[in-house]
Amino acid sequence: MTNGATATDWTAQRMRSVFEKCKNWGRWGTEDEKGALNLITPAKRREGAACVVAGEAVSCARELPVQASVENPTPALHMMLVGGDDCLLPNVGLEATMDFVGVAFHGMATTHIDALCHVLVDQQMYNGFHASEVKSTGARRGSIMCAKEGITSRAVLLDVPRLRGQPWFDPGATIMVADLEAAEKAQNVRVTEGDVLLVSTGRDARRERVGPWNPFEQGLAGLHPECVEWIHARGVAVLGSDGVSDAFPGMGIPGWVLPIHQCALVAMGVHLLDNLRLDTLSEACARHGRWAFLFTVAPLRVERGTGSPVNPIAVL
Amino acid sequence: MTNGATATDWTAQRMRSVFEKCKNWGRWGTEDEKGALNLITPAKRREGAACVVAGEAVSCARELPVQASVENPTPALHMMLVGGDDCLLPNVGLEATMDFVGVAFHGMATTHIDALCHVLVDQQMYNGFHASEVKSTGARRGSIMCAKEGITSRAVLLDVPRLRGQPWFDPGATIMVADLEAAEKAQNVRVTEGDVLLVSTGRDARRERVGPWNPFEQGLAGLHPECVEWIHARGVAVLGSDGVSDAFPGMGIPGWVLPIHQCALVAMGVHLLDNLRLDTLSEACARHGRWAFLFTVAPLRVERGTGSPVNPIAVL
Amino acid sequence: MTNGATATDWTAQRMRSVFEKCKNWGRWGTEDEKGALNLITPAKRREGAACVVAGEAVSCARELPVQASVENPTPALHMMLVGGDDCLLPNVGLEATMDFVGVAFHGMATTHIDALCHVLVDQQMYNGFHASEVKSTGARRGSIMCAKEGITSRAVLLDVPRLRGQPWFDPGATIMVADLEAAEKAQNVRVTEGDVLLVSTGRDARRERVGPWNPFEQGLAGLHPECVEWIHARGVAVLGSDGVSDAFPGMGIPGWVLPIHQCALVAMGVHLLDNLRLDTLSEACARHGRWAFLFTVAPLRVERGTGSPVNPIAVL
Amino acid sequence: MTNGATATDWTAQRMRSVFEKCKNWGRWGTEDEKGALNLITPAKRREGAACVVAGEAVSCARELPVQASVENPTPALHMMLVGGDDCLLPNVGLEATMDFVGVAFHGMATTHIDALCHVLVDQQMYNGFHASEVKSTGARRGSIMCAKEGITSRAVLLDVPRLRGQPWFDPGATIMVADLEAAEKAQNVRVTEGDVLLVSTGRDARRERVGPWNPFEQGLAGLHPECVEWIHARGVAVLGSDGVSDAFPGMGIPGWVLPIHQCALVAMGVHLLDNLRLDTLSEACARHGRWAFLFTVAPLRVERGTGSPVNPIAVL
């Protein structure tokens, strides 16, 4: 979790330089809104499908958090419209039960995908679109509709706590490039262009043991900002974590409170998967001895949406 | 769309007999809540993955219907929480935009999956659980959580209108067993145990041409109740349609207003996918000359939910 | 419903001139956000209270429209959280039932009050505040919080259809100044400064007879734009109607699709009450032979809100 | 806050006896759903109106709590539909802003009225209606629609902390009958039949000083169960408090966790107003030297609703 670098090495100037170096703006055209999803080719989907050996499917989503908790100040709404006590639909003559589900999915508890418009730097989102494109009536640019056909690719899970023999990394801990590469080596897998990269911090195990905590107060483990260039170099298409990819609180770099979010979404056009559940997946990978698998994320087709709650499915 | 059978052949007594004959209650244990999802084996998932040849991914979902229309009296809610005009989050220091999405997904416009508890016959759901298990606070039995790991299988699309050279079937028209088998033959594909079966009625094409219509008033094309036994015999795991699988209005059989829903969900434990978008998929299948593909449905993990809005993804 | 004026007399230029003439901007200070509510003085409230003779209370609200209809494309949400079938609250040990209520209250079916920020003319709201004050995160200016202490005053109901011996005015019909003054005379009442003015068009009676209709397609009866100056001269504090005060469709004046809304909310700072139910009140007034009464509107205290659903109460 | 009685005097048996003694079931007919609202007569409304001397209006509601807090685990939803950045309505040609408001109003933070169906004792609500009348689709009996014409009456505020020279009563503290009568005497006012009784515990002052707290963990000041009979004897029509009328936690009487709620709503048919804001009102009363005033509560007309968020208005 540490290397020679110290916090003071990471100034706003350096962060800005990383941001500029990893910028994919214009790389797929000036009107492009898909960003690094462009790296997921038909060949990559075939490569993902070829990872299906055991035929085991594992969800990477948490239950929709309908109860308020310290990690979840805005609980999802799940409300019955018709229950079994009154289920004979008038006029239709069918016995049916129905419900409503709603959620403000951004935050620290709901498994969701961030659209590229979710974060901005200096009022600009990926590919230079201006903040004013995200109106009170929805996002005209950078919406989740760029992933409307779903995201299907090969994915790789790197479980650094497992590598270290720890159940989890403490809140605030940072994962370094060396950690990622050590995990690759230990797990005998390599992150390649177009992959979905999933990074476990052991958050599920910690939550199970100590209960939920408030990430804004107590923090979350995540990637050190030095990982940005590595992610860029490897051609990661989508990045996900059981936390929010960023270590929180971060390194106190002025203007860069969530540098992974800012560089992934804005500079690179890399979609993020937040609040995944990765413990079951990690166990399955360990059991099968394979850490690459077919991965599908299917956002709801919300026009002008800034993301979507999702239930990402890995098939090993 | 017709065979020798006349409507009068389909009495409540006959329908009940079909219902009883196709009952899977107890087949996978008295406590089972997965129903025909039990037919999706690891081997079946591998078979699905092996269908990925072109590496093309196609969504089978419609846009979340946020506008009211005659087919959609309860529009989904999509509301911005933070837009680009006020996106600097206080206390956090991040520029971010956020929204809320909510939906009463059952109905005739939202692409969704029905949990087994969604429909009851004589106050009973699949496997004999009583209506009172679906409380005002949610479903204790038969909830969508039985599919929490997602549904990944091989799927087959049968496009009968295409076979007939018609853009669509008119509302109320019924697809017979002979139609399904003719489509299989013409498309050189066979529905086998554990498959997801998708049946196109051309609804998308008709909506595009004549605009949305009120299914309760004008009807929907769908499967004739004689298809129930065929679906059972073939071991279909999940059934989906661009309509609601049922022809609507049906044959006027007392107590059997939506016989496919009633027999699939309640008797067989077959989950249903309603209001799919199948036109793009049909074109892709025709283009590739293959009508079987990998298929993933990833319901939101809504505890006690009666289903979920979904974005099912086919990969050819 | 007609006078010598023809539609062509009402040009955009004339409308603009009326708008400018009736402008209350700056009248109560450059920072004022209460507008004509300033006309409701303690004396006025006493005057209202003095109208209570019979002690009969009448609601002027419609039921919250939870069903979609042609007049109501965005139905309100009313969903149970806990019903009687599962009402023993865990941990608390109390038997309780609970629900959720939500509504996008603007529109043509929900009884609501418009905040002054609800309508703008040339990007400006009442008192010259700019449209950009109404952010994606809520209204910084002109919100309904200016009425947070409620609106209590004397109110006058003018029922022109009753005066004419008609059950209702047809959609699109316009009420003229002469109509208002004839009603005053017939009803032996006079609208004075600080009053709430309620104008009946008989919409309730028509809806009961012919069913709901789509106001955007078929129109609504309402006030002719010539009434603006009269309303201003009389010092009306709040204006309400069983329609939306405006006749719809209007006179086709370019830029002035809802001139009453535009002049009342923006120029005069007069709050509007839309979609009231006035038939019961009118009958009560006729029965008591008095058309002035105590009137209370109690908006929910929604910070930054553009209005509120309300249940205005008249006491005669 | 104390009298000779000790907690151990208050057994379940005694509580049950109070409950039975105060039962108004059948008093206004076997089908009655209004309960003690029947005590508000036209004469009572006139008496309320006659209390308007100064003409000052004061709201007794808190701001709708859209932020989660320890006292508010289910924040209200306030979301913009159209802001000033995109306010030119397509097709209509009007510049307008709009929002949505929704709330699960029961709880410890939203100012609301409890319908009589909100609480049950032994599966029965007021007048003996069974719990099963409150279905997953809404309340068939005891809904808030019994107050659809609003509640207009004379109200009395008793401010016991003020009497004691204390800014507030500590969480868990109980107000006794002697306290209420001492306040009546000190304030020179008397609670009479048909009145709305408001009881201040100083919660607002405490919240302002120490911040919000979790009532389930830290408690709330409220009425001692011995007050039930006094409330019944006085003919209180509606009871309200800045807390929830009950002291919390209570006296640990088995089955009677919120005895005031249980006796008021279920036995007496007395509606409750929870989480009022009473500090401003108390100051106004003190300033005017009068503690009786006109009071209006105007619930939203939610058919089958278990209550409503409200903004109760006092006029002195």
Image: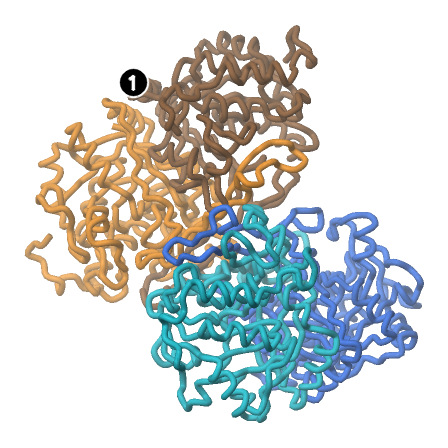
Chain colours: A brown, B orange, C cyan, D blue
Q: Where is residue B150 in the image (x, y as percent from the top left)?
A: 39, 35
- Taking the image as shown, residue C136 lies to the left or right of residue A98, namely right
Question: Which quarter of the rendering shows the C terminus of chain B?
Answer: top left
Instruction: Return the chain for callout 1.
Output: A
Q: Where is residue A177 in the image (x, y as percent from the top left)?
A: 55, 11
Label total for image: 1
Depth order, front residue of C63/B130: C63
- Taking the image as shown, residue D36 lies to the left or right of residue B294, namely right
| Residue C82 appears in the rendering | no
Q: In which quarter of the image is residue B188?
A: top left
Image point (66%, 87%), residue name: C55
Image point (21%, 65%), residue name: B252
Q: Where is residue B99 in the image (x, y as percent from the top left)?
A: 51, 43
Amino acid type indicated by mark 1: Ala
- Taking the image as shown, residue C265 lies to the left or right of residue A156, namely right
The vertical placement of B232 against D163, above or below, is above
Q: Quadrant of residue C31?
A: bottom right
Depth order, front residue of A274/A33: A33
Depth order, front residue of C246/C176: C176
Q: Where is residue D286 in the image (x, y as percent from the top left)?
A: 87, 70
Image point (72%, 73%), residue name: C41
Q: What element carries label 1?
A: helix
Q: Which residue lies furthest to the left in this view?
A: B4
| Residue B36 appears in the rendering | yes
* Residue tagged 1: A43
